[in-house]
Image (cartoon, rainbow, N blue to C red):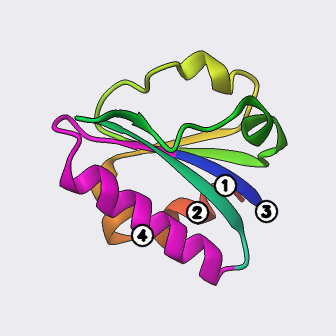
Amino acid sequence: MKIVAVTACPTGIAHTYMAAEKLEKTAKSLGHQIKVETQGAMGIENELSASEIKEADGVIFAVDIEVEQRERFAGKKVVQVPVQLAIKDPKSVLAKLG
């Protein structure tokens, strides 16, 4: 499965990157392809391209704030969870995509 994700927390520092790392490691261990965009204190980093979003089978928003440029994901299956869930139980988050 090809997955794209966005992680973001109010301060946009530690938890944003911790969630991204957990999702990446877990997805890869399950045989999925994943790219994670982070949104936080440094702005948007590792920005997802239009083609990456288009080719994705699903989208994960592990966020505690509003996703910037959310309209890019229109028409995609989106699972939204709190950042802490992505950090503590990334496998369950990925399972929500089906």
Q: Which residue carries the number 3 mark?
A: 1
The image quadrant that residue 95 belongs to is bottom right
Which is nearer the N-term, disc 4 or disc 1? 4
Which is nearer the N-term, disc 4 or disc 2? 4
Q: Residue at x 63, y 76 (%)?
A: 28
From the image, which quarter does the C terminus lie in?
A: bottom right
The amino acid pointed to by label 1 is: Leu
Circles 2 and 1 in contact, beta carbons < 8 Å: yes
Residue 17 magenta: yes
Cα gap from disc 2 to disc 3, whole angstroms: 10 Å
Which is nearer the N-term, disc 4 or disc 3? 3
The amino acid pointed to by label 3 is: Met
Q: Which mark is residue 97?
A: 1
**23 with respect to 29 (left or right):** left
Placement of 72 over or under 87, stated as above or below:
above
Which is nearer the N-term, disc 1 or disc 3? 3
Q: Which residue carries the number 2 mark?
A: 94
In terms of secondary structure, what is the magenta stretch mainly?
Answer: helix
Cα gap from disc 1 to disc 3, whole angstroms: 10 Å
